[in-house]
Image: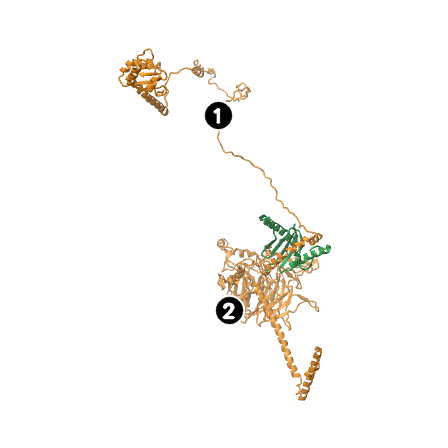
Amino acid sequence: MSSKRPKSKEAKKTKGKGHPDYIFPLVLTSATQEMFGCRADEDVTGENPYKLLKKEDIIKDMKTRASVSDFSPLKQLVLDYPEDELLLVFDRDFTYGQSFYLVLTVEAKENILKPSVEADEEQMKDEEEEEEEEMIVPKTPESHPWISLGSEKEIEEESVTESRPRLRYKISPLLRRCGAPVCFSDRSAEDGKEGFVECPSYQDKSFSIIEMEKDMAIQASSDTKHSSTQTLWKYPKNMWTQYEPREFSPEEKEHHLQSKNLKNFITSVLIRFEISLQQNYITDVFCDDWTALCEDDAALTGKTETQLKEYQTFMDLHFSKEKTISQVHWHPTISGVIAVAMTERLSLEERIDNSTKLLLNPSYILFWNFTDPINPQLQLECPDDVLCFQFCPSDPNIIAGGCMNGQVVLWDISAHVERLQDTRSNSKNISNKLVIFQDKNNVTPVVRYCAVSGIENGHKAPITDIQWLPETFELSKIGIPVENPSRISVQLVTCAPDCCVLFWDLRPPRVMSHSLTDVKQKSEEKPLENPHGVPNTFKHLNLTWKPFIRVSLPKIGSSGEYSPLKFSLRDNTVDCPSDKPLQNADREEGCGFAQLRVPSAKQQKPLENISTKLYVGTEDGELVYTDWKMEKDNDSGRLLSTKPIHRFLLHDTLVNTVSRSPFFKDIILMVCSFSFAIWKEGVTNGPILMSAFSKHMRTVGHWSLSRPAVFFIGKEDGSIEVWDLLQNTHEPSLNQNISSAGVTCIRTSSISSKQNLLAVSDRLGTLHILQIPWTLRRSSNSERQIVRKYFEKEEERLEYFEKRQIKHEKEKKEMEAEQQRKKTEPVMPLKQEEELEAEAQKEYEQFLALEKDILKNMGLLNETEDSLDM
Amino acid sequence: MAMAIVGSTVVNGRPIGFVGMWLGSAEVEDTLKRIQGINGVIGTIVVNAEGIPIKTTLDNSTTVQYAGLLHQLTMKARSTVRDIDPQNDLTFLRIRSKKHEIMVSTDKEYLLIVIQNPAE
């Protein structure tokens, strides 16, 4: 306000009252206030202090109230007022001294009214502007002159100024030293303490500066922790507990048995048990009839093939010309390998004629492998034609064969087994091997026999059958089967038409020498060395081998002997291959034979359940049942074989097969040239089954290894008959032609569980491999029982027939006797009539007496009846 | 009543001193023989509550094995039945296997095991 005074130089006359001229403060009484409607704090307030009063009202008021009116001092002014309305302003703050003031001039009124509006507007604008300014742009500070507060002194103190000009010195050595030779030497700074002044650091204990502020930075990072631990390693240890069950002593048991509780319990539960047990006995509720029914018909589903399908054929071009196959065997362990014995296809006369030529062409046993149908894998050289051979059941690398000259030959093929096994595996390798080992694959290795029996001690006729004894037993000197501790087959049986069956032992014979010198001499002798390349497995036997039992077959009822062609033992290795194929495979091959010794008779333990009887098929078509045990002849003290027990004649032709069924040990199939028969061991009446004569000669027979009712017969015209006993017993179920020449041997493969291959060899030297169809391969569950029942039925039939026959004979005899009697009795003369009458009368009187007696006994007899009778 | 079923010996229902006890044992024997005589029965075992065999018709090792195993199984079966309904109790257990049928009847104190080969 005071500053505004000198500024405003407008002519505002002040009357010393402190208010401008146009303002006239006045006091309004409350009556006046009420009259004019400007009551203080009611109509006019601090905020709204303006009130427009009408001039006429004021004049009226002045007239009415004359001097009392508040407006009286303003009379003239109000009258002069130009306009109709005067502005009365409520002066709350007593700015002009009074509570109200009147604005006298029009322009002042305008100014007050408007500026208040304008001022408001201006204020508002200012405020707005200020606000805007603050929001947008901060007010730039106005520059003011600097006021010193004493800081420049500090700065002056801190700054470094030169207080004096800098001093300059120049140091130079004396002139005489310049240019003179100098000698420098090294001096270490550490030598002596005068060279330098050191100011080492030391810990100041009086250090008292405390760090007040420290710059620090914090960063969050993931917490990692390494730790490790050592575990206790406990050794695994075997632990066991031994325990036994708790049991009652007999007294306690008795006590319990006597107790009443037990009695009550048992009697109470008895009914339940009886019901359940009877239920089970009546019918089996869990038996599924549906599945049990369809099992037998499973063979009909799907596979309809019934023919034997050709799988592969083997024919060797080099060796099979003019040769025939005499026997075929599958390798017992290696699948897909088959061994074939080739012999010359000549009759006896031709052999004699060509004997010189035959000597130059040695005969062989060939090994064929399915992977290579052209080249045989192995050739075994034989001293003569081999008619039969066999793999050793405990060691398939040993092969024994019987030759035409009566010798028994042994081969050891352990060196070449890998070759047989290698080529069995994938043939892809062969192409690789061809590059490296060309020679090996082109040339078939020839294996020479490693032992051969002595000629004078063996057979004198071609050996027609050879078999190994199973490894479960061996024979002693007199033929008693004893236990075989080594579990290796060491004994062979051979037969030939020279009327004897020989037993051979592979082990070196027991030396019966008592003196030591003899033994020494024998050991000093150089043993016969086998030629190069032949293993020395049997060199102890070579050329000196002789049989230890010779069984002869004298004829029953007549002199002479039977000439065996084939034989069959009850426990043999041919027909029934053992279930566990060769547990001894990991034993070293062959070398065990030389070390084996025939044990002494005392050590051997005889086995009870081995039958010592064998069936022999002879040249004359007979089947002879004999025992191989030797008996001591009382007269001469030598060991002689017993007479055969039975002999059956079927036909007058050669027997070519005697073979036991692999399922029934007492059923034997015997095939003669035109018929075959099935015999049962122990049944002596006749064959169980006898076939009809066939048009073509039957050359070989073989049981099927998977179905008990099936066997195969090979014929001269090259066809195979398949007989199924469940279907037909009078004709074969299948007759199929295999080749053009006669069949010489049939063998079924016995290794794989599928067992679906049939090896058939023919007279031309070709080996056919056929596939057996599903129906012939798979047996139903009850087939064995059915076949057994069939055989039993047939046996009963035979018995019945025999009984019938005996009865028939008896009847016949009786009839004859009756007839005889009739003939010999004297003819009775005609009886006289009187005599007849007398006889009749006598009889009648006898009858009357009898009647009387009876009636008397019955007490019915009295006078009246007596008279009636009369 | 229970006595009448056996039929062979007549007892008053009260043991007559020593004679009565002897008769009780004979009844047990008779009943067991009767069960054993039914067609197809392989063996019979009487076992006490702890699984110790009292009387058997089989050999010792088989008996002990059957008794131990079946005792455990019976206990388990009984606890199962009683868990479902505590008022209930196991009376008869029949186990049918491929080869045999084993029947077990239980009581508070004893167990009777019968092994049968069903009709085949």
**Residue A537 visible (yes or no):** no
Q: Position of residue A777 (x, y in %)?
A: 53, 62
Q: Secondary structure at mark 1?
A: loop
Q: Is residue A279 left or right of residue A374?
A: right
Tell me which amino acid carries mark 2.
Asp
Chain B representation colour: green
* Residue A179 vs residue A811, the one in the foreground: A811
Q: Residues within 10 Å of mark 1 (few under 14, many from 20)?
A: few
Circles 1 and 2, Cβ within 8 Å, touching? The answer is no
Mark sitting on residue A719? none
Q: Is residue A6 left or right of residue A766?
A: left
Instruction: Say if A400 sits above or below A95 in the image.
Output: below
Q: Secondary structure at mark 2?
A: loop
Mark sitting on residue A215? 1
Q: Position of residue A618 (x, y in %)?
A: 59, 69
* Residue A178 vs residue A589, the one in the foreground: A589
Q: Which residue is labeled 2 in the image?
A: A717
Q: Position of residue A5 (x, y in %)?
A: 33, 13
The quadrant of the image that shows the N terminus of chain A is top left
Rounded to the nearest angstrom, the CA distance separating label 1 from label 2 is 117 Å
Chain letter for the orange colouring in the rendering: A
Protein chain holding label 1: A
Query: Quadrant location of residue A789?
Result: bottom right
Instruction: Say if A740 sits above or below A279 in the image.
Output: below
Mark 1 or mark 2: name the one nearer the start of the chain. 1
The quadrant of the image that shows the C terminus of chain A is bottom right
Tell me which amino acid carries mark 1.
Asp
Q: Position of residue B6 (x, y in %)?
A: 66, 58
